Amino acid sequence: MLPIIPYPAFCRRLAGSFSLGEETRISADASFLPAAELTVGRLRVPMCLPLVIEPASEPANIRFVKDAGIEDPEAYTLRVDESGVEIRASGEAGAFYGGQTMLQLLPPAVFDSVPRHDAEWAIPFVEIEDRPFFKWRGAMLDSARHFQPVSFIRKFIDVLAQHKVNVFHWHLVDDQGWRIEIKKYPLLTEVGSRRSDTLSGHWFHPRKHPDGQPHEGYYTQEEIRELVAYAAVRNIQILPEIEMPGHAQAAIAAYPHLGLLPEAAPVSTTWGVHKTLFNTKPATFEFLEDVLDEVIALFPFPYLHIGGDEAVKDQWQASAETQAHIRELGLADEHELQCWFIKKMSGFLQSRGRKLVGWDEILEGGLGEGAVVMSWRNRDGAIEAAEKGMETILCDQNFLYLDYYQQENTGDELLAIGGNTPLEKVHSYNPFPPEEGTPEKLAHALLGLQAQVWTEYMPTTSRLEYMTFPRMCAFAEVAWSGAGRPDYADFLDRLRPHLRRLDVQDIRYRSP
Ligand code: TNX
């Protein structure tokens, strides 16, 4: 099989191949110019050719053609024969994906950033018809526990796009760091983006100790705007996440009046579930709405993630003021207060034309249509969400957490958080085995799947890459190719040449 990952819905190889060279001419429909440019831009340096893109009216042997007859804007067809390469799509996304598949039909050297005189630039004759199985193919990156530089975020977006992932869920704040510039509240980054040190060794380990290294970093609004645009032309939307009411320790360290203790805890230097919560006073909601207004202005994606996970209620329980608030609102307990909190934010986001996304804990309080649930603990949250009329995304930790160990015998592995999601397990992910079928309600409500990269134990970007790849490649195939994907042995065959593509892009991975 041709080494394409994720594998296309239909692919037939024909005898022969088409060679690219000095005489190659390229044309594109005007609306496909960015997609064509992103494809051809890859060829120029390794092939040492100028390769200009001409209007669709010009004769050419790589053609990006608009075809309104293709229903899904992310779908495309790709045909290679004696006349050259023809990519057809109705939408810019489809044209971009057709281009990405074409690159995978060329030698891995095409992903290199230096001239490659050793490569033979031939594309096999082929007929491909391709479309995504799931509409939401997400990848979450935690930039709060460890900060990654902008150059890395760009690299990460590049690789996701090559795998036809279309949502980059950006976990921007947590107990250990606030990483997004908010103009109205400068202390969020001045104070909240810095911590004195970081836990070295595992959180559960008796000999864990502070590493003595301060850790800091945040993204300016200018950088974020550029990244949003950079992702958009690669058919990736960025979903920002601002955590509440828990995972809020960095925010409260910066603005102690948002919390419940007379003296706020500092930006956290350890992992695990923390007890720090936002209080429920009007000033806190004013703060949160101001923050979200700035976030909304930066990210055009109609969805916005407010976390909602792991908010242990001790501080609300212990606070006389919060207890009085619960009674005043006529609520039964702290759990109902959490629901009230999330509902309030959902109403606010709706008033701004955005949909609230939250981790499956937001189900605990009767949120209804309009909210989106990310089901992380298992698939039950997704089923429950669908029954309640909400859209949902499967993020199942047992299969899609890429911070878990990559083999059963964890003794040989670099330190990780725990769990076990080897490559084969990720590739095998099938939330609804055929004998069970997908619950009918869920079939409509399920937007798609998402892989998670939490970075507690990924202090460097090379460690992050080692944990992410090639599991992200397997995930992408599950999300794009769906139930009809080739089996794991076939995936491994295609993965071998695929890893050469990662090599020339200087991406680390765990050798399968
Ligand atoms: C649980 S998943 C968390 C994160 C951790 C992760 C580690 C979720 C909504 N919360 O805060 O980083 O486990 O695997």
Image (cartoon, rainbow, N blue to C red):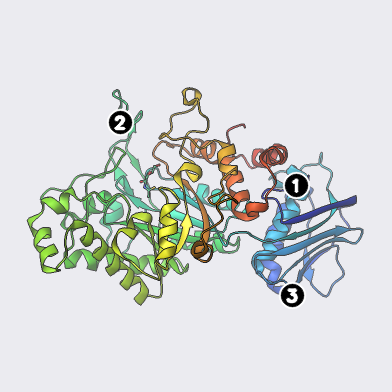
- Mark 3 or mark 2: which is in front? 3
Q: Residue at x 40, y 59 (%)?
A: 384
Q: CA distance from mark 1 to mark 2?
A: 44 Å
In the depicted structure, whether residue 467 falls above or below residue 59: above
Quarter of the image for residue 242 reads: bottom left
- Answer whether labels 1 and 2 touch (C-beta < 8 Å): no
List the residue tagged with mark 2.
Answer: 212
Relative image position of residue 88 (x, y in whole percent): 76, 67
List the residue tagged with mark 3.
Answer: 69
Q: CA distance from mark 1 to mark 3?
A: 35 Å
Relative image position of residue 282 (x, y in whole percent): 17, 68
Secondary structure type for disc 1: helix
Horizontal arrangement in the rendering, residue 164 relative to residue 14 (left or right)? left
First in residue order: circle 1 vs circle 3: 1
Quarter of the image for residue 298 reads: bottom left
Count residues near mark 2 (Cα–Cα under 10 Å), then give few for <14, some for 14-19, many for 20+: few
List the residue tagged with mark 1.
Answer: 46
Horizontal arrangement in the rendering, residue 208 relative to residue 417 (left or right)? left
Q: CA distance from mark 3 to mark 2?
A: 61 Å
Amino acid at circle 1: Pro
- Mark 1 or mark 3: which is in front? 3
Q: Residue at x 87, y 69 (%)?
A: 59
Q: Residue at x 54, y 57 (%)?
A: 438
Horizontal arrangement in the rendering, residue 252 relative to residue 510 (left or right)? left
